[in-house]
Image (cartoon, rainbow, N blue to C red):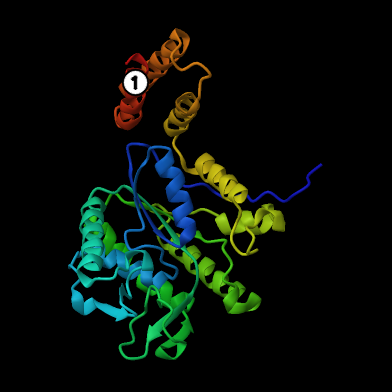
């Protein structure tokens, strides 16, 4: 008996491995997937501009990474003693322009250098709606709670998204020909757009991504995060308290689906071994000074060494140092 409708799709012809460098850009759903990748020891550059919601702002961020011109004080504005950038999330905002610029430009330089070597990217679109500054026409990545009357709000068309991203992807591959990308549409509902407006926004994003995938079938793939939450997990128990964001359980489920579809077989093997090592690291003994526990730590260190020897790019130096320090503390 089938009790729910399982979402099926064609997985990408390419995969993620621990040897890859991975860039994630976009909405807070990209943050969730990025954190899971970081926890599992993938080499990740996660949202160097902070959370971005619309395709135009994500495209602007990538163009800046391709040509990393440093931001200056002219790119900031002061609101109530805090300096913000219209190109960045508020996590970069500080009480001094110097500190704000230092954070912004450090991440810019780091991510721009990484982009030269990045082999995989995950791009998550959250909304097709954008806010333009009336004074300049600039699409802002974040309004930073400024009054609505300073902006013009509009919904991007499928054609506009496809046109901008087609040109951007050609520039991106000229910069780094090895890069392959997954696109996702965030399942997080933007309820301020209204139920119908949210659906129109998501439909616009889905159609645009589908068109791009048709244009570049070898370099682009689509992962159906939106469809999995809407159709497989169509129950409010899979939402957070605001009834708009997915719950932790839903995020874990979608991560498992993403991992199953997108990770290489080697990466899956590594994760199974790493999961057992993690359990050992987190284990809290009743008698930490006992010889039995010391043997347990040495066995865990041996497993870590064997894993690293087999897969040299799987970095366990921090965990190894922490375990060795634990042994030294017990022997003192």
Q: Is residue 178 left or right of residue 184?
A: left
Q: Is residue 59 left or right of residue 107?
A: right
| Residue that extends furthest to the top in the rendered view of this protein | 291
Q: Is residue 206 left or right of residue 73?
A: right
Residue 142, image x and y in percent? 40, 74
The answer to which quarter of the image holds residue 91 is: bottom left
* Image quadrant in which the N terminus is located: top right
Residue at 54%, 49% (x, y): give it: 10
The residue carrying mark 1 is 329
Decide which of 302, 80 is in the foreground and name it. Answer: 80
Decide which of 120, 173 is in the foreground and name it. Answer: 120
Residue at 42%, 18% (x, y): give it: 300
Residue 125, image x and y in percent? 47, 65
Q: Residues within 10 Å of mark 1 (few under 14, many from 20)?
A: few
The answer to whether residue 167 of the structure is visible from this angle is no
* Mark 1 secondary-structure assignment: helix
The answer to whether residue 40 of the structure is visible from this angle is yes
**Does residue 173 lie above or below 127 as drawn?**
above
Residue at 51%, 20% (x, y): give it: 285
């Amino acid at each position: 008996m089938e009790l729910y409708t399982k979402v099926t799709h064609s997985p990408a012809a390419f995969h993620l491995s621990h040897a890859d460098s991975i860039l994630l850009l976009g909405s807070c759903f990209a943050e969730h997937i990025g954190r899971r990748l970081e926890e599992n020891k993938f080499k990740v550059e996660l949202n160097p501009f902070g959370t971005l919601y619309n395709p135009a702002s994500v495209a602007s961020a990538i163009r800046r990474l391709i040509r990393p011109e440093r931001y200056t004080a002219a790119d900031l504005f002061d609101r109530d003693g805090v300096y913000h950038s219209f190109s960045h999330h508020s996590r970069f905002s500080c009480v001094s322009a110097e500190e704000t610029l230092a954070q912004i430009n450090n991440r810019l330089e780091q991510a721009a250098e990484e982009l030269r070597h990045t082999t995989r990217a995950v791009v998550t679109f959250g909304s097709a709606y954008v806010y333009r500054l009336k004074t300049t026409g600039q699409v802002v990545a974040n309004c930073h709670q400024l009054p609505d009357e300073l902006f013009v709000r509009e919904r991007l068309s499928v054609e506009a998204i496809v046109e901008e991203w087609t040109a951007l992807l050609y520039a991106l591959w000229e910069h780094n020909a090895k890069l392959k990308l997954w696109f996702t549409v965030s399942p997080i509902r933007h309820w301020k757009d209204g139920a119908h407006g949210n659906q129109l926004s998501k439909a616009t994003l889905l159609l645009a991504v589908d068109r791009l995938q048709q244009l570049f079938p070898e370099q682009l793939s689509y992962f159906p995060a939106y469809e999995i939450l809407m159709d497989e997990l169509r129950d409010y128990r899979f939402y957070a308290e605001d009834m708009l964001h997915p719950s932790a359980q839903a995020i874990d489920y979608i991560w498992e689906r993403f991992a199953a579809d997108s990770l290489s077989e080697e990466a899956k093997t590594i994760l199974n071994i790493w999961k057992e090592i993690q359990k050992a690291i987190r284990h809290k003994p009743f008698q930490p000074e006992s010889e039995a526990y010391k043997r347990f730590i040495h066995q865990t260190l041996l497993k870590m060494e064997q894993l690293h020897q087999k897969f040299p790019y799987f970095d366990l130096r921090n965990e190894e140092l922490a375990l060795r320090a634990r042994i030294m503390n017990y022997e003192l």
